[in-house]
Amino acid sequence: MESLSSIQVTAHSDQRTAHTSSTSGDNGRPPSLHYQICNYNGIVDMTSTQSSPSNQADVCANCNVSACATLAAGDGGAVVLLKNCSACLLAKYCSVDCQRAHRSKHKTACKKRAAEQKEERLYSQGLERPEGDFCLICALPIPLPVDDHSVFNMCCMKKVCDGCAIAGQLRGMGDNCEFCRTPVPSDNEAALAMVRKRADVGDSDALDYLGWEYFYGGEHGLEKDVQRAIELWAEAADLGSMEAHFQLGNKYCSGDGVEKDKAKGIFHWQEAANKGHAQSRHKLGVVESNADNWNLALKHFLISAKMGYKCSLDAIRLMFAHGHATKAQYADALKGYQDAFEETKSPERDFARAVEAIREKIPSGWDTHS
Ligand SMILES: [Zn+2]
Ligand SMILES: [Zn+2]
Ligand SMILES: [Zn+2]
Ligand SMILES: [Zn+2]
């Protein structure tokens, strides 16, 4: 009988043959602090786009001073500036001292609200394919997994879909990058120099790529150095690379090359999923299904299935077969998946797929010239 553990096995391998990555989308950092400033004339001036819960009174949670009060002349006569607790955005304080004094009373509510907010963000962000998942030439979303359906060029660190790559070849682009037209580097050294140049100026895609080169070693002559790879991925992740977050998630959750730290790994998958990384979203679904949290697993799988990730659709089909999802939920996932898949189609991509199918049929060692 089909086992639910096969949900895991159906996930695509973490390794990739062609490398791509993206830095687009929300930066995933906590929202900026909310300030409310009351002017002398009593007009409230919102200086931040982050609004506070409307039922919160504009008073310091500790000393009750109002946002509309002015300080005593001895304190400079300035207006009171209330600052939200950055963890929960629930309580406001007039000073660090007040926040400190109130900490023990506020701790439980703060933790609860912060956890709720984190969960709200997790299921409401990253629902669309990110900008970096679109081909820069034909502007269509690249089928998932992106690495299996695109080529990547070290000159500009840009990816181009298989359809546009083959169309470029037919137009006689030869060994030039389909995107920036730079000639393909002549050797490993020249290729790595191109990447390092971009990494040195903080290109997160280049840092992520170097991470790959160091983690697996070999492809362009770099010696394997796992520690260096993790450092590079961490740097790339800090700069917003979804792919680097995904890799860190994979490595920390599996203990491959690093000390196993599931919480840290899940954090990285969440960061990537919040930016629209479908494979990370799928991994989070697997984590929840392994813990029998079927509702949460379904939420994750639905999001990634509707982005066009087949493994997530398969997972929902299995959940349906085992009574963990309804027929309507599976139908919803299937429709979403099909719509997303349709959006990735183009005649050039169909052609590229047909060429690939023919190539696969040619036996190895076959000499087409004889
Ligand atoms: Zn106060
Ligand atoms: Zn708080
Ligand atoms: Zn394209
Ligand atoms: Zn290029």
Image (cartoon, helix red, strand yellow):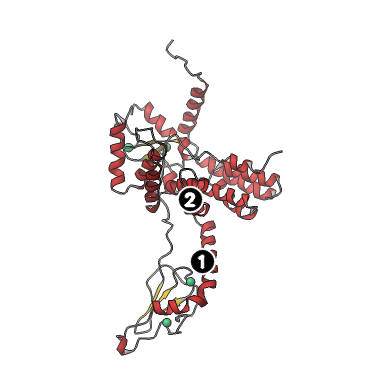
- Which secondary structure, mark 2? loop
Q: Quadrant of the C terminus?
A: top left
Residue 254: percent from the left, percent from the top? 52, 45
The label shown at residue 218 is: none
Q: Mark 1 against mark 2, which lies toward the viewer?
A: 1
User: Could one spot residue 315 in this view of the protein?
Assistant: yes
On residue 276, the disc is 2
Q: Residue furthest front?
A: 259
Which residue is tagged 1? 114
Residue at horizontal 40 percent and vertical 84 percent from the top = 68
Q: Is residue 189 above or below residue 315?
A: above
Q: Position of residue 279 (x, y in %)?
A: 51, 45
Instruction: Looking at this view, name the residue that lies furthest to the bottom.
Output: 73
Residue ID at (40%, 37%): 160
Q: Is residue 265 left or right of residue 317?
A: left
Kind of residue sitting beneath label 2 = Gly
